[in-house]
Image: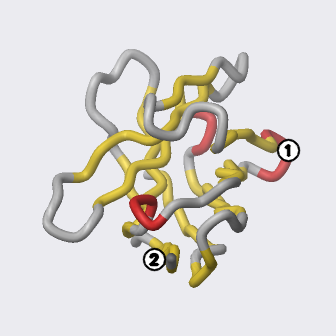
């Protein structure tokens, strides 16, 4: 099992920045990649960014390219989501997730952290 704990959400004005953190514990050696998802009010949960655990390859949704950066600290089993130039439409609950190698679905999820961007 892998446990994930997010932190760093909050209220910020449009154009501002936030950094989300996700600390992983447990069988972290089994992690293939980690991702950040978000669920906006009334919408489905969507992938925002992901990063492979070993090589650090990244993927970003079009809506956040150039504004968000995902990074990892393998020594501390932590993944970050640096969010810049935030927009009101970035308002959502953000979830950290992890999946094992060769898995399609994400196996482990954090509890979520609220990000609210005011206009």
Q: Residue tagged by mark 1?
A: 75
- Select label 2 or label 1 by which is in front: 2
Where residue 53 appears, x then y in whole percent? 65, 29
Vertical order, 10 against 21 (above or below): below
User: Which is more toward the observer, 5 or 17?
Assistant: 17
Q: Is residue 87 left or right of residue 58?
A: left
Label 2: element kind: strand
Q: Residue at x 40, y 71 (%)?
A: 111
Vertical order, 17 against 28 (above or below): below
* Upstream in sequence: badge 2 or badge 1: 1
Where residue 25 appears, x then y in whole percent? 61, 58
User: Which is more toward the observer, 115 or 88?
Assistant: 88
Q: Is residue 92 left or right of residue 78?
A: left
Labels 2 and 1 touching (C-beta < 8 A):
no
Where residue 90 appears, x then y in whole percent? 45, 60
Q: Residue at x 22, y 70 (%)?
A: 41
Alpha-carbon neighbours of circle 1 within 10 Å: few (<14), some, or many (≥20)?
few
Q: Residue at x 45, y 77 (%)?
A: 114
Please tell me in which quadrant of the rendered image residue 72 appears. top right
Q: On residue 37, which mark appears?
A: none
Alpha-carbon neighbours of circle 2 within 10 Å: few (<14), some, or many (≥20)?
some
Label 1: element kind: helix
Q: How many marks?
A: 2
Q: On residue 114, which mark appears?
A: 2
- What's the image's color scheme? secondary structure
Where residue 44 appears, x then y in whole percent? 17, 53
Q: Is residue 19 left or right of residue 89?
A: right
């Amino acid at each position: 099992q892998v446990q994930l704990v997010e932190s760093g959400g909050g209220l910020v004005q449009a154009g501002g920045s936030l950094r989300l953190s996700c600390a992983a514990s447990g069988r972290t050696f089994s992690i293939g990649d980690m991702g950040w998802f978000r669920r906006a009010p009334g919408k489905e949960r969507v992938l925002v960014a992901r990063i492979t655990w070993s090589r650090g390859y990244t993927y970003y949704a079009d809506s956040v390219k150039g504004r968000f950066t995902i990074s990892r600290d393998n020594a501390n089993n932590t993944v970050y989501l640096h969010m810049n130039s935030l927009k009101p439409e970035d308002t959502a609950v953000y979830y950290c997730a992890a999946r094992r190698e060769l898995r399609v679905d994400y196996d482990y999820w954090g509890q979520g952290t609220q990000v609210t961007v005011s206009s």
